[in-house]
Image (tube, rainbow, N blue to C red):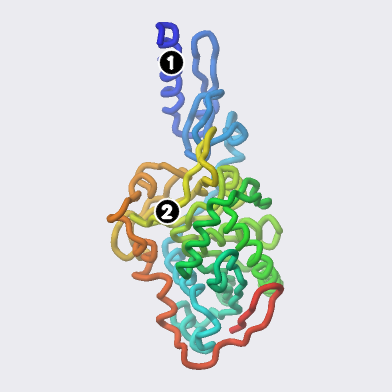
Amino acid sequence: MDTKQSVILLTLVTAALACSQHQDCDTCSSSSIKILFTRKSCVWCPLTNSCHISGIPNTYCNGGQLAKSSAQCSSIADPPMTYDPVLAAELAKWSSLSYVDPKVYDKASIQSAVSTQFGSNYQVVEFLTVDCDWIFQFDFCSAVIAKSLADDRIIVAFEGTSSPAQLTEQFVLSFTGLKSFDPTGGKILEYNKKTHDALYPCVKSLLEELLTAQPTAEVMVTGHSLGGAQAQLAAAHLVKDGVVSSDKLHVYTFGSPRVGDIDFAYGYDRLLGNSWRVTRKNDPIPLIILKSTIPISLPNSCFHTRREVYYSGSGIMTSATAHKICMSNEAENGCLEKDGFCVLPDCFLLDHQKYFSSDLPQLMKGAISKNGTPPTQEMRGACKSYAI
């Protein structure tokens, strides 16, 4: 490298450091740096909450996602919202209910367990199941919907991965390409797309019926693991379809893997306000799908949506457990990717189950009897429906 090239490189590094010192979008986008005989603007990347030099390729944000003015800063700013750890603990238990197979559990016992856990004002409305064995024969994917007239709430909980065959299928289909997802823009993993396309119309149909009777209801959408990915997709689609307004929708996911690419994450963040992605130390699943970067990404790599809530402790989480609200989508100090990333033997799937419970998928199953009469199967569109 000759002297001229060294000077140019040193100037670019100095300018990059000068922009990176800005800690908010307005200050960043109104600043500029002189580089040799030209002046370069600083631009803000909302996916990492960081400031960069314009015209230089960014690791995560593409040109259309960078904020270059105060007006653009206003359009990408997070709406006012507050993470509610008490609600998070409650919705984790609702996520657990989605693992219950309605074909084999007693109908009265299901409702009794819900009344004991959440209060007698909560009623399970329906379990919805649909065949989603795209490669292997492992049975179905499902969601459960409940309501409370007293609290004016509707709960939608999506089931997570429930068998080794289903996990294998997800892994295989994570290498088959990304598919377009219109509600947010961008692309999502094929397994996520197939499952969403099969289950969402049934969920939408039931929600439209319930919201006709409860038009002011708050809608809580939740899920653990794969169920978290489905919760995000359903929430985005419900808002885009006009079924639920964003200000009435609350999304809490637990241990969700990456769902789609950078454009999906950016579009989701703009569409959904009160959406929280809860993670915990040593849970490998949120990081199991490769991460996208710009300008070069590995095939089928994805990017997390924002508003991670990171629990760094190793014990059972409670509503009083200390946690960190992460400001960036990815790669933030003190959050899962930087603080909680682990490799075997330190990283165990057991940590993936420990969201507000010692074993979240088994929590509600343990409170429900198999002795008795299961609910009657009917049909809602292409889904099997089990009314409680």
Amino acid identity at mark 1: Leu
Q: Nearer the viewer, residue 69 or 200?
A: 200
Dot 1 falls on a residue whose secondary structure is helix
Question: Which residue matches tag 1?
Answer: 9
Q: Which residue is mark 2?
A: 309
The number of discs equals 2
Q: Nearer the viewer, mark 2 or mark 1?
A: 1
Q: Position of residue 202 (x, y in %)?
A: 67, 70
Residue 354 image point, x, y percent:
36, 65
Corner quadrant of residue 286? bottom left
User: Is 321 situated left or right of 375 in this image?
Assistant: left
Q: Residue 200 at x, y = what percent?
A: 65, 65
Q: Nearer the viewer, residue 237 or 49?
A: 237
Q: Callout 1 environment at 10 Å: few (<14), some (14 to 19), or many (20+)?
A: few
Label 2 or label 1, whichever comes before in sequence order = 1
Position above or below: 122 against 251: below
Which residue lies at the image location 49% right of the left edge and 18% below the top edge?
33
Residue at the spot x=43%, y=15% of the render? 9
Q: CA distance from mark 2 to mark 1?
A: 38 Å
Q: Quadrant of the N terminus?
A: top left
Whether residues under marks 2 and 1 lie with C-beta atoms below 8 angstroms apart, the answer is no
Closer-to-camera residue (369/236): 369
Mark 2, other Cα within 10 Å: few <14 / some 14–19 / many ≥20: many
Q: Is residue 342 above or below residue 297?
A: below
Relative image position of residue 41 (x, y in whole percent): 54, 22
**In the rendered structure, which amino acid carries the disc numbered 2?**
Val
Q: Which quadrant holds residue 23? A: top left
Q: Which residue is pictured at 59% across the width and 29% down the height?
A: 69
Q: Nearer the viewer, residue 290 or 326?
A: 290
Quarter of the figure with residue 382: bottom right
Work out whether 218 lies above or below 265. below
